[in-house]
Structures are given as C-alpha cells and as structure tokens.
Image: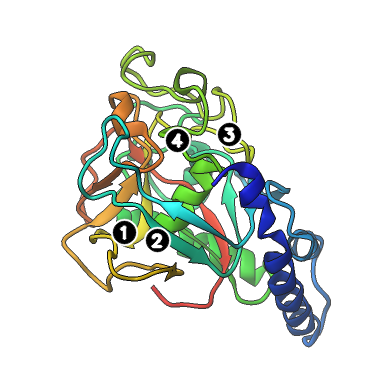
C-alpha cells in the first residue's frame, strides 16, 4: 500500500475517532473540572484524524515529548519473498487496526528516562542519546509511571495510556505507507553498521519518514509490547493483533547502530528476554493509545 492508500482509510478512522472523542470528552467533563489543554489537544487531533498530526506532551523535568498521530487503517504487514535480507518469520498478511494511536517522534532519551527512573542503565551517558540496555519489563514500568503521573495531573484523556507499541503499530508507523524494505533511502533515515562509526547517536538527527518519525530504522532497536510469535497464515484479515499472552520472548524492531541494513528493514523482527537488558543498542519508543485491551 502506498501513502495515498494509507490515507484512504481516514474516513473510517475519523468516524471511529469522532465517536471515541465525544465519549472521552463526556467522561472528562463528568468530574469536578473540565479537560486540560493537553487533553483537548489530544482529543482534537483524534477527532480530525489527520495522519502525521503532531502533538507535544509536556513532561515535568523531561521537557517536551513530540508524538505523531497514526490513524486506524488496513495494511500489508511482513515482507514479500523477493525482499533482500528477508527471513522466514515475515510472511505477508493483511492487518486491520481499528483505532489510531500516537507514537513518539524519536526513541526515548536518557533525559526523559531519568525524569521518572532512579538510575541510567546506558553505558554511554548523554541526555539526548537514547536510553539503552533497558529490559522490556523496565520499559513497561516507565510507561506505567508516566501514565500514572500524567493521569493524576489531568493531562491525559480518560482511558488513555502510555505503553510500548504493538508490533503491528510499530510496523505501520515505520512504513508510513511505503511497501518497500525501508521507508526511504536508508543512509538518510538511519544510523546502521555502515555509517554509524560504531556508536550510538543523539535522537532525531536522521531524516524523518512520511509520518514525521525519526530513527525508526537504526540507531537503537525498540521494544514492542507483543510477545514473539509466528504470523497467522490462515486468516484473511488479522484485526488488532496483540500476539500471544506469553511466549519465549518479547519482540523488538528497527535494528541498531551495529546492525546490517537487512536488520533495519521495516519488516525485520527480533526477540529478546523480558527481564534482561544486555544490549547496548536496544531501547524503546513510546506510544499513546486508548486502552481497549489489557496486556
């Protein structure tokens, strides 16, 4: 699907988003006070449904956290047999996401991490560098703390949470409507083994993809919320895939500064150990979504 096709589902997304935003607004104003400016900004973008619309959350001690809106849509996930570097766990299949979500423009930085967590696990300090050597469990704990703080202070609409993106959400955001191995010219988009100089770089220095997202390919790989599993092969359309309740390891995506180009492809997948964080090129990127499911 090209980017025009990606945007073609906006009408469906807008109908869902409008109904959802009305419900959330009613919930927000049913208490003692009305929604905050940040809540209103979120709900306005959801109602408008424009792909790539920018929303900036203000985090105490961490500064701004820029995100982009990704509308609900249908897309082809996985890679075609002829794609160079393709692995057997990437069969193409049709996915329908029934609700949109916000996803951070960049990987989480050490500055943002330290605003909520006690220690910095990254071997190379730098406030604008991505936080790395973070386990899947630690990443999810960060999301819980951020959600709790922002909910208590009235900055999130009722029912919205920060979390890791699902694998389907991650790939949809990475592709930005592009069907190829990368969402553009790789050297312009990514720090990888061929151009990184063997080191991690500050976030946001490479070009953005069609949704305004940076570092989706390369720099550091990114945890997803799903446990790793095989893609379905006998379902015409896989709706809101969440993966199994548990498997041997959670998934991560995107490749890192030590990765060959093949590992930085939009469809490339990898798995790690939930409680361990030995990887100096593995971090995460935040997503903001309405909680329709429990994971």
User: Residue 171: where, in percent of width, then height?
Assistant: 45, 48
Residue sitting at 50 percent across and 55 percent down? 75
User: N-terminal of the two: label 4 or label 2?
Assistant: 2
Residue sitting at 50 percent across and 25 percent down? 189
Q: Give me the disc on residue 141.
A: 2
CA–CA distance in space, label 3 to label 1: 28 Å
Question: Is residue 59 something one can see in this rendering?
Answer: no
Q: Residues within 10 Å of mark 3 (few under 14, many from 20)?
A: many
User: Residue 54: where, in percent of width, then height?
Assistant: 72, 46
Secondary structure state at the residue bearing disc 2: helix
Query: Are the residues flagged by discs 2 and 3 in contact, CB closer than 8 Å?
Result: no
Give the left or right position of residue 242, taking residue 107 as reference: left
Residue marked by disc 1: 137
CA–CA distance in space, label 4 to label 2: 34 Å
User: N-terminal of the two: label 2 or label 3?
Assistant: 2
Q: Looking at the image, is mark 2 or mark 3 nearer the viewer?
A: 3
User: N-terminal of the two: label 4 or label 3?
Assistant: 4
User: N-terminal of the two: label 4 or label 1?
Assistant: 1
């Amino acid at each position: 699907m090209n980017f025009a096709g990606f945007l073609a589902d906006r009408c469906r997304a807008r109908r869902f988003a409008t109904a959802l935003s009305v419900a959330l607004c009613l919930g927000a104003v049913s208490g003692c006070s009305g929604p905050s400016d940040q809540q209103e900004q979120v709900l306005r973008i959801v109602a408008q449904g424009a792909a790539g619309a920018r929303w900036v959350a203000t985090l105490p001690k961490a500064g701004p956290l820029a995100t982009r809106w990704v509308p609900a849509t249908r897309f082809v996930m996985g890679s075609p047999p002829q794609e160079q570097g393709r692995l057997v766990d990437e069969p193409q299949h049709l996915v329908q996401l029934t609700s949109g979500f916000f996803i951070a423009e960049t990987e989480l930085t050490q500055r943002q991490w330290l605003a909520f967590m006690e220690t910095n696990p990254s071997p190379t300090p730098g406030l604008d560098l991505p936080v790395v050597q973070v386990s899947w469990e630690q990443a999810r704990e960060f999301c819980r703390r951020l959600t709790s703080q922002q909910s208590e202070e009235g900055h999130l609409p009722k029912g919205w949470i920060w979390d890791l993106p699902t694998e389907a959400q991650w790939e949809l955001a990475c592709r930005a409507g592009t069907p190829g191995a990368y969402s553009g010219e790789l050297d312009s988009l990514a720090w990888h083994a061929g151009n990184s100089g063997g080191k991690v770089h500050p976030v946001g220095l490479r070009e953005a993809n069609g949704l305004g997202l940076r570092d989706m390919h390369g720099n550091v790989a990114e945890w997803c919320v799903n446990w790793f599993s095989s893609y379905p092969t006998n379902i015409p359309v896989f709706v809101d895939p969440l993966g199994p309740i548990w498997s041997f390891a959670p998934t991560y995506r995107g490749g890192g500064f030590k990765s060959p180009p093949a590992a930085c492809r939009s469809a490339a997948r990898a798995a790690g150990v939930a409680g361990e964080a030995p990887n100096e090129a593995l971090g995460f990127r935040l997503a903001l979504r309405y909680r329709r499911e429990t994971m």
